Image (cartoon, rainbow, N blue to C red):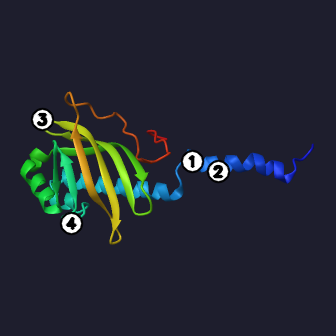
Amino acid sequence: MQRLPAWRAARVLLPALLILPAAGCTAPDQRLQQRLAGILEAQADAWNRGDIDAFMQHYWNSDELTFSSGGQTRHGWQATLERYRQRYPTPERMGRLAFSELTVRPLGERAALVLGRYHLERQPDPADGNFSLVFERIAGRWVITHDHTSAAEGGLRPPPESPAEPHAKGCVARPGG
């Protein structure tokens, strides 16, 4: 059996080695994806306990926080908290929150974009839609610095039967895989 010269082997293998990381998640991206998905899970848990204050702990406590929804943009953590308290005054009105179809896109070392869907099960008016969140690492913590949430057009869509696991840019998340 004839061996390839080292330079030929390198010419064949090097492009493959450069392409492979782009085809899947890098370890830092996976850690970031898990960290941010964990924050959203903690938010859903707080929401489902009826604890808006705990839910809000993952937002940047700053006047520079922005929250866009319903054609309006609010500025500041306090204004966002007051909006939540006004719209969801009781645990029954809050209902049960779930997130699905999460996509995490790193935006450098200290920021990330998270896209996903929310489903709010409550009576008499369940709701769902999509969201985009900008997370930034500030003072050692990942916090939401911008939230843009939109209700689904044309009414409620059923939640996915098996939601995709969160994934980072370039990664494909499949249920059970």
Q: Which residue is mark 3?
A: 125
Q: Is residue 80 above or below residue 72?
A: below
Q: Helix, strand, or loop for circle 4?
A: loop
Name the amino acid type tagged 1: Ala
Q: Position of residue 39 (x, y in %)?
A: 32, 57
Position of residue 64 measured from the top left corner of the image (x, y, whole percent): 22, 62
Callouts 4 and 2 close, C-beta under 8 Å: no
What distance separates the C-alpha of mark 1 from that of mark 3? Answer: 42 Å
Q: Amino acid at mark 2?
A: Leu
Q: Nearer the viewer, mark 3 or mark 4?
A: 4
At 55% across and 47% down in the image, what residue appears? Answer: 24
On the image, numbered disc 4 is attached to which residue?
62
Q: CA distance from mark 4 to mark 2?
A: 41 Å
Q: Mark 3 vs mark 4: which is more N-terminal?
A: 4
> Hey, what amino acid is under mark 4?
Ser
- When the figure is inspected, residue 158 is found, relative to residue 9, above or below; the finding is above
In the orientation shown, which residue stands out farthest toward the bottom? Answer: 139
x, y percent for residue 154: 20, 27
Circles 2 and 1, Cβ within 8 Å, touching? The answer is yes
Q: Earlier in the sequence, mark 1 or mark 3?
A: 1
- The mark that comes first in sequence, 4 or 2, is 2
Pointer 2 residue? 18
Q: Residue at x 25, y 30 (%)?
A: 157
Q: Amino acid at mark 3?
A: Asp
Visible residue check, residue 125: yes
Which residue corresponds to the image point at 82% horizontal and 48% vertical from the top-left?
A: 8
Contact? badges 1 and 4 (CB < 8 Å):
no
Residue corresponding to mark 1: 22
Q: Residue furthest top?
A: 154
**Which residue is drawn at the image coordinates 20% and 45% (left, top)?**
96
Q: CA distance from mark 2 to mark 1?
A: 8 Å
Q: Earlier in the sequence, mark 2 or mark 3?
A: 2
